[in-house]
């Protein structure tokens, strides 16, 4: 009887065995699941690169070379990064319609999925700036006043103090920033497209870029109100002086002619 009692299992023994089995299963999952996920991500990235290479061969290789090395008709894309592709293709500037002093913004012909595939392929040619996340360019935590200060110090020479754009030399121009997606403004600061200098994080931090984007949204947003009334395109003293010259001086001349005509008529009578 004592031997039988000694061999009798404790009531909690089955529960302990079950918990140990679950722990072992979880441990095995922890070991193998991340590897499976990493492998799946790697496969998806490889597929995106392959699809991007096909799109590149059709729409980009004629100017940028079959391997993105560049040619006499287009610069090398090695090391420009995904952000440059997302900006250039996502704003319709690329593929370029025709050569000129500057490639203008136009209708986008690729879907975002295709743009992402092109970006994946170009990124595989050499490391460069990545496409920013919404947390990087979104309004949360942005300082509009600081953004205005940074914009006036670094950008107004070309884009005007409210981002309306302006003329440059030899047929080039700084485009208007009104209606441009915050992501594309961030990417432009990262990559320095065409005549624009680049502003890496060592020059303008991620927070600085966020502040500038918030400022531009504040002065050009849908709910923006001009406290001065007619803003005349926001072009500053040139447009204001021209307005005063044409309408102000024109009104004075009209009044002077009217007074002279009335005076001459009064003398005759």
Image (cartoon, rainbow, N blue to C red):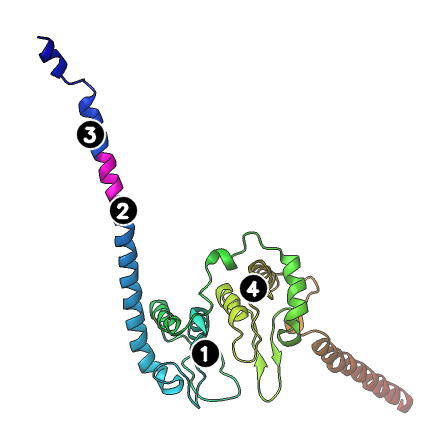
Q: Mostly what secondary structure, the magenta segment?
A: helix
Q: Which mark is residue 31?
A: 2
Q: Quadrant of the N terminus?
A: top left
- Residue placed most toward the observer, 144 or 27: 27
Which residue corresponds to the image point at 44% horizontal and 88% vertical from the top-left? 98
Q: Give how far apart the Cα atoms at labels 3 and 2 are.
A: 20 Å
Q: Is residue 176 left or right of residue 5?
A: right
Q: Earlier in the sequence, mark 3 or mark 4?
A: 3
Q: Earlier in the sequence, mark 2 or mark 4?
A: 2
Q: Give how far apart the Cα atoms at labels 3 and 4 are.
A: 53 Å
Helix, strand or loop status at disc 2: helix
Instruction: Say above or below: 192 vs 74.
Output: above
Point out residue 163 in the picture as x, y percentages from the top left corner: 61, 70
- Residue placed most toward the observer, 209 or 138: 209
Q: Give how far apart the Cα atoms at labels 1 and 4 are.
A: 25 Å
Q: Is residue 170 among the parts visible in the rendering? A: yes
Outermost residue to the right = 267
Task: Single out the mark in the foreground, 1 or 3.
Answer: 3
Q: Report the residue marked by disc 3.
A: 18
Q: Report the residue marked by disc 4.
A: 201
Q: Is residue 218 left or right of residue 81?
A: right
Which residue corresponds to the image point at 28% horizontal and 53% vertical from the top-left? 35
């Amino acid at each position: 009887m004592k031997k039988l009692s000694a061999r009798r299992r404790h009531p909690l023994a089955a529960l302990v065995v079950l918990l140990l089995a679950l722990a072992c299963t979880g441990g095995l999952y922890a070991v193998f699941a991340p590897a499976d996920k990493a492998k799946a991500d790697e496969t998806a990235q490889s597929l995106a690169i392959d699809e991007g290479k096909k799109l590149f061969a059709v729409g980009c290789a004629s100017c940028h070379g079959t391997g993105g090395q560049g040619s006499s008709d287009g610069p090398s894309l090695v090391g420009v990064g995904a952000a440059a592709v997302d900006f250039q293709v996502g704003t319709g500037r690329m593929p370029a319609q025709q050569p000129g002093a500057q490639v203008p913004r136009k209708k986008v012909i690729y879907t975002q999925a295709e743009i992402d595939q092109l970006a994946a392929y170009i990124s595989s040619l050499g490391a460069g700036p990545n496409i920013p996340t919404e947390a990087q360019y979104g309004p949360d935590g942005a300082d509009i006043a600081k953004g205005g200060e940074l914009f006036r110090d670094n950008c107004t020479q070309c884009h005007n103090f409210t981002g309306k754009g302006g003329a440059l030399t030899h047929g080039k121009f700084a485009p208007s920033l009104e209606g441009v997606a915050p992501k594309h403004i961030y990417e432009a600061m990262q990559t320095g497209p065409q005549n624009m200098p680049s502003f890496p994080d060592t020059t303008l931090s991620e927070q600085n870029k966020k502040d500038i984007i918030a400022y531009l949204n504040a002065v050009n947003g849908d709910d923006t109100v001009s406290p001065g009334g007619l803003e005349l395109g926001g072009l500053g003293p040139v447009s204001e002086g021209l307005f005063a010259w044409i309408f102000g001086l024109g009104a004075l001349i009209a009044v002077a002619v009217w007074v002279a005509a009335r005076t001459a008529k009064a003398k005759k009578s």
